[in-house]
Image: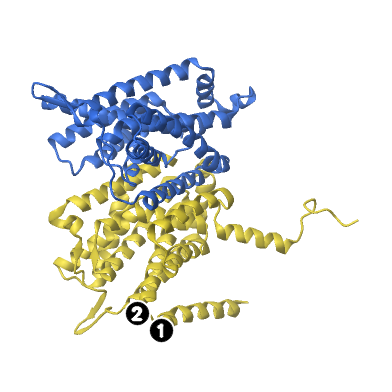
Chain colours: A blue, B yellow
Amino acid sequence: MVILAQLINGLATGGLYALVAAGIAMIFGVSELVNWAHGEFLMIASYLFFALYVLARLPYPIAGLCTMLLMLAFGALFQMIVIRPVVHRPWQTQLVATLGASIFLINSAIVVFGTFPRRAATPLSMQNLTIGSLSISYQRLLLIGLTLFAFFVLHMFIHRAKLGKAMRAVSQNRDACVAVGIDIQLIVLTAFAIGGSLVGLAAALYAPLGNITPLMGIPLTFKAFAVVIMGGFGSVNGAVASAVILGVVEAFTIQFLSSAYVDAMSFLMMLTVLVWRPFGLFGRQVGI
Amino acid sequence: MRWHRLVVWLLIAAVLALWPLYVGSPYLVGVSITVLIYIALALSFDLVVGRTGLLSFAHPGFFGIGAYTAALLGLHLGSPFPLRLGAAVVTAVLASIIIGVPSFRLSYHSFAMGTLGFAFIAQIIALNWIPVTRGPLCLPGVPPVDLRMGSWTWSATTLSENYYVVLILATITLWIVVRVAHSRIGRTLMAIRDDETLAKAVGVPVLRYKMLAFVTGAGVAGSLGSFFASYASAVCPTELGIAYSVNLIIILFLGGRGTLAGPILGAILFTGLPEFLRMAEAWRLVVYGLLIILASALVPEGIITWAFEMWQKRREGPQLGSAPLAN
């Protein structure tokens, strides 16, 4: 029973990692740019959700949906303001630009909300489903269910919609896409908007389960990034699969080893994978 | 022209030597020590980032490892400072070899992430290995910088004495960096940064040179860590934190990578100035964040490089075609 409960907890955490990592992988796929502020997207989204749900007292589904839509806009704006001026610069400059954005977002949150942790508990997060000795919060089940649904929608979009097909084309051959007249900037903008809305969904689902603090995004960026590297750079499916594996491994680490070293797990896993398969678990061997 | 340069260097040396007497206030001397630590750290970091093109996040980790080594030796064995410094350099170098071997299998973003992973793990160990590091309680009571020769002993107890010690360390760092930069090694590193494939093609053992830069930087960072442990008289897990990495990256990218003046100017601007202006931490970082975004869009090679280009353009006068000719 303990094992089953931890498996479900791990899947829920893995779902959160997957939603963040999918955005990073998708953005990297179309623009070869790593968004080091992606964890801060989640932090901003969590505060947005807090403002809408706790302060403005909107009903939970509406607050969640609004968070997603606002984050979609936020992702697009972020691309226009921060990313567009550095698109043609070397990768170090791009990395530093997103790092600067992350510092800006964290400290703006500190200035506005303070460092005191906020909570946005929902009725679902306070009730548990109990079967025998197994007890799981409904919120985690909702998280797992809606994350699966979101990835189904994303999969359909990438494979069926014209814009989604263009995104896949850009990640395969950028120059050819320019030649046939695909607007690369629009594709990158779309990737940021989708990444933003996925993170918005993650915040609406996960914020009720934990504390909202200005620094909550930092470990998430690193873990999501580790997961993206494990999955093979730019491969969304690989990132999602590795995210779920990491979530489960972390849950079992807390249960059977120690909660102190749980944050080191992601890096140990990443390094093991990289030494064994430098191009990731699911990646092709490409120079990146 | 040689005497001309000598006079300038002597003047700079005199100003730096008399600086603590001039500013007087202990607070400002303390700030100057911090600035000098950052200058030396940034110069050694630039050896890796600016001259090899590798974005490493492990650098503050080596600083922290040096600090912990020196603190433990000083606390438990009462070793004199030169021994602590030597031990700090050796452990930092060993750590950099252990970290470097797997990390150099990675490229670009993955290298950045891999080194960051090591820095993260180092901090988690420092926080949780209670019997040795005392975790978040820190290691207090590290003995000050001292020299012993027979019955003669000297220890740096005042701020000014610490200032002179770190001034010497920073000068040695500058000397090492200048020596490396103007040698065959430095030129090879630049070649690797500018075109790794080409460097490989002409027979440069790329990995060995990258490792050399990485290990040298780590050794310097370790030695600075040993000083910091004595100066602050305590070592905490936060010394291994990402905040240091972020500060160093800001200093290099805004000051100017691959130059000598860039890291120095960056360190003065971004550690000294906010202290003198006494801004609140959160607001200061909000401004920093904005400045980084702006700088990466407008002056991606750093302020120094940009200023130098501007100065050169002005000296050469208007270019043909760039300005309409009279008549």
Name which quarter of the figure residue B24 lies in: bottom left
Name which quarter of the figure residue B92 lies in: bottom left
In this view of the protein, can residue A25 be seen by the observer? no
For image coordinates 23% across by 61% down, the residue present is: B69
Circles 1 and 2: CB atoms closer than 8 Å: yes
Task: Mark 2: give few (<14), some (14-19) or many (20+) Cα within 10 Å.
Answer: many
**In this figure, which residue is indicated by the disc labeled 1?**
B21
Could you tell me residue B52's position as x and y percent? 47, 50
Residue closer to the observer: B60 or A164: A164
For the C terminus of chain B, the quadrant is: bottom right
**In this figure, which residue is indicated by the disc labeled 2?**
B160
Question: In the rendered structure, which amino acid carries the disc numbered 2?
Answer: Ser
Task: Mark 1: give few (<14), some (14-19) or many (20+) Cα within 10 Å.
Answer: few
- B101 shown above or below A127: below
Could you tell me residue B185's position as x and y percent? 47, 56
Question: In the rendered structure, which amino acid carries the disc numbered 1?
Answer: Leu
Residue closer to the observer: B162 or B76: B162
Q: Secondary structure at mark 1?
A: helix
Q: Earlier in the sequence, mark 1 or mark 2?
A: 1
Q: Residue furthest top?
A: A160
Q: Is residue B204 left or right of residue B78?
A: right
For image coordinates 37% across by 51% down, the residue present is: A110
Do the residues marked 1 and 2 share a common chain? yes
- A55 shown above or below A159: below
On what subunit does the disc labeled 2 rest? B
In this view of the protein, can residue A116 be seen by the observer? yes
Could you tell me residue B4's position as x and y percent? 60, 79
Q: CA distance from mark 1 to mark 2?
A: 8 Å
